[in-house]
Image (cartoon, rainbow, N blue to C red):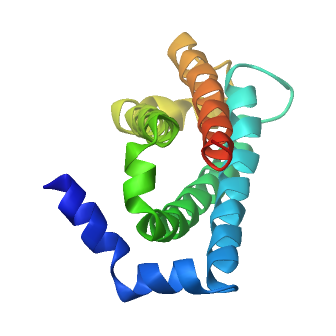
Amino acid sequence: MIEAWLAALEGTPLARALRDSVYIYPIVNTGHLAGVALLIGSIIPLDLRLVFAWPSVPLAPLWRVLTRTAAAGLLIALVFGSLLFAARATDYAASGLFVSKMTVVAAAMLNALALRVISPDEITRLLSTGEKPPRRFRIAGGFSLVAWITALTLGRMVGYF
């Protein structure tokens, strides 16, 4: 059943256009990479700050700017990545590297969501006081660093294997 859905997805006019065009696929790939660059470029400094790098730099302005930038990058990467997936859905679904990448992306997204949902008052207090982030924030930041760099690495490997 999943195989039929994947094959149908690959058979859509949009997926065919992505595969057949000399220009569309590279443009969509560039959009995906731009989203990944925004995401990773935003999340790494924020995560490093959470694990207590640069303690003299206030967390609040970084948090406000970088969380929004990372969210925009994630949205862009997901939209363009979905288009790339449609072009070769059966190949990607059969790729252990791709499945691993998506699993790590899901874990990283859940980590970020859990931090925001479980601790909104603690985040507000932390941002207003400038105190050292609690241990679980540092653990979440460390996990995020590892997860997003792993997802980035797996994503690059998908293109080569």
- The answer to whether 62 is drawn above or below residue 26 in the figure is above
> Looking at the rendering, in which quadrant would you find the C terminus?
top right
Q: Residue at x 36, y 72 (%)?
A: 10
Q: Residue at x 68, y 79 (%)?
A: 27
> Looking at the rendering, in which quadrant would you find the N terminus?
bottom left
Q: Residue at x 63, y 20 (%)?
A: 142
Q: Position of residue 123 (x, y in %)?
A: 51, 34
- The answer to whether 45 is drawn above or below residue 83 in the figure is above
Dividing the picture into quarters, in which one does residue 53 lie? top right
Which residue reaches farthest top? Answer: 135
Question: Which one is nearer the viewer's eye here, 149 or 3?
Answer: 3
Dividing the picture into quarters, in which one does residue 149 lie? top right
Q: How many marks?
A: 0
Dividing the picture into quarters, in which one does residue 131 lie? top right
Q: Position of residue 103 (x, y in %)?
A: 42, 35
Question: Which one is nearer the viewer's eye here, 146 or 13?
Answer: 13
Q: Position of residue 22 (x, y in %)?
A: 69, 85
Instruction: Give the side of residue 16 with respect to residue 42, left or right.
Output: left
- The answer to whether 87 is drawn above or below residue 73 in the figure is below
Q: Residue at x 35, y 38 (%)?
A: 117
Question: Which one is nearer the viewer's eye here, 52 or 3?
Answer: 3
Q: Position of residue 158 (x, y in %)?
A: 60, 45
- The answer to whether 32 is drawn above or below residue 124 in the figure is below
